[in-house]
């Protein structure tokens, strides 16, 4: 399953001497009034005295946003599985979605940390205690991805590049909206994983993608971002398309496990579909690629439904 997972495991804390030395370095370089100020996804004010030159990214989607915003050369550390663009794949690792290495991050001496709020929140607070500026990136709508591009560009001093990337993203988003407007609605069950069976709730970014493509998430009423559901609940929802998100859009064997349920419209009409999770499950600039891929899949579903 290639979807961001929350983690709260405890890492080794930096030694007292290392923490003090690091705090001293921060204090020496932090004089003057803040000139770069943005509000992050949590509503917190993030201020820098000067553009960030050493950035640690604690989320794969944030890494992609930073590179797209023109700040790739300033990224000095990432978490696994940051693998896009190619340059990110060879950067130093400072943990994964379950735990981050505080001592390693301190050794890198970043002036900005960009994180997903659900990755090791206790460790994020410790980074703040060290005096680090932490920007939380958690886009809940497709539009907020462009907003994050612009804010990160402001913090990194690459605003011009970020504005161009955001404008290009918004243009593609508008084109999708125009193209899909008025299309017949398709009832969609989006399957993240099969054991246990996971889907997305109505507030999830993937649910917004389904809506953009003229689909209706059959579990939109669920409030959890990624709830577990039963097979019986899926059968009762009678989706007209079942869409699985996998690495590289490779068809999983578990998608075809629905084949015996011929009473489900998605099965009866051959609408067992696959999209690339690396695109659609990350709230970065490639999300729009995933949206376009999902729209093509739902177009096929409409054809199979005779619409």
Image: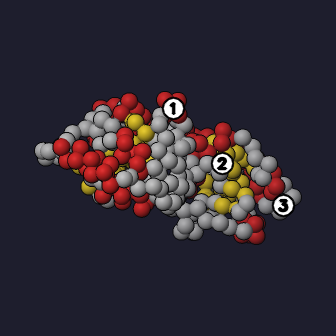
Give the CA separation, mark 3 to mark 1. 45 Å
Q: Residue at x 58, y 62 (%)?
A: 226
The answer for how far apart the CA atoms under marks 1 and 2 are is: 26 Å
Q: Residues within 10 Å of mark 2 (few under 14, many from 20)?
A: many
Residue 151 visible in rendering = no
Numbered badge on residue 90: 1
The reply, left or right, for residue 207 in relation to residue 275 is left
The residue that label 3 is drawn on is: 261
Residue beneath disc 2 = 245
How many C-alpha atoms fall within 10 Å of the one at disc 1: few (<14), some, or many (≥20)?
few
Question: SS at mark 2?
Answer: strand
Residue appearing at x 57%, y 69% in the figure: 222
Q: Classify mark 3: residues with Cα within 10 Å, few (<14), some (14-19) or many (20+).
A: few
Name the one closer to the observer, 208 or 27: 27
Which percent across, then down, holds residue 134?
33, 51
Sequence-first disc among 1 and 2: 1
Rounded to the nearest whole Å, what is the CA distance between mark 2 and mark 3?
20 Å
The foreground one among 298 and 65 is 65
Numbered circle sitting on residue 74: none
Q: Earlier in the sequence, mark 2 or mark 3?
A: 2
Residue drawn at (65%, 66%) of the image = 228
Image label count: 3
State the image coordinates of residue 163 (x, y, percent, origin top left). 33, 36
Q: Position of residue 21 (x, y in %)?
A: 27, 47
Q: Look at the numbered discs 1 and 2 and tell me whether their residues touch, using CB distance below 8 Å.
A: no
């Amino acid at each position: 399953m290639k979807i961001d997972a929350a983690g709260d495991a405890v890492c080794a804390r930096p030694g007292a001497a290392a923490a003090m030395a690091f705090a001293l370095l921060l204090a020496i370089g932090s004089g003057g009034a803040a000139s770069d100020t943005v509000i992050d996804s949590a509503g917190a004010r993030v201020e820098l005295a000067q553009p960030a030159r050493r950035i640690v990214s604690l989320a794969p989607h944030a890494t992609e946003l930073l590179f797209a915003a023109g700040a790739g050369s300033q990224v000095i550390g990432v978490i696994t599985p940051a693998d896009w663009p190619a340059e990110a794949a060879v950067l130093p690792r400072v943990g994964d979605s379950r735990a981050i290495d505080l001592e390693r991050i301190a050794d890198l001496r970043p002036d900005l940390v960009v994180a997903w709020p659900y990755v090791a929140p206790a460790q994020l607070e410790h980074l703040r205690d060290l005096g680090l500026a932490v920007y939380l990136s958690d886009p809940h709508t497709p539009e907020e991805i462009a907003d994050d591009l612009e804010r990160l560009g402001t913090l990194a001093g690459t605003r011009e590049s970020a504005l161009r990337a955001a404008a290009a993203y918004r243009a593609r988003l508008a084109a999708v909206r125009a193209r899909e407007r008025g299309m017949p609605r398709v009832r969609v069950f989006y399957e993240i994983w099969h054991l246990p069976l996971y889907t997305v709730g109505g507030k999830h970014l993937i649910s917004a993608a389904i809506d953009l493509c003229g689909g209706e998430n059959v579990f939109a009423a669920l409030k959890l971002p990624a709830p577990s559901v039963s097979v019986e609940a899926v059968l009762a929802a009678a989706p007209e398309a079942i869409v699985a998100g996998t690495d590289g859009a490779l068809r999983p064997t578990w998608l075809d496990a629905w084949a015996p349920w011929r009473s489900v419209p998605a099965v009866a009409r051959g609408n067992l579909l696959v999209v690339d999770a690396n695109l659609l499950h990350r709230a970065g600039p490639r999300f729009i690629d995933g949206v376009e891929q999902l729209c093509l899949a739902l177009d096929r579903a409409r054809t199979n439904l005779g619409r």
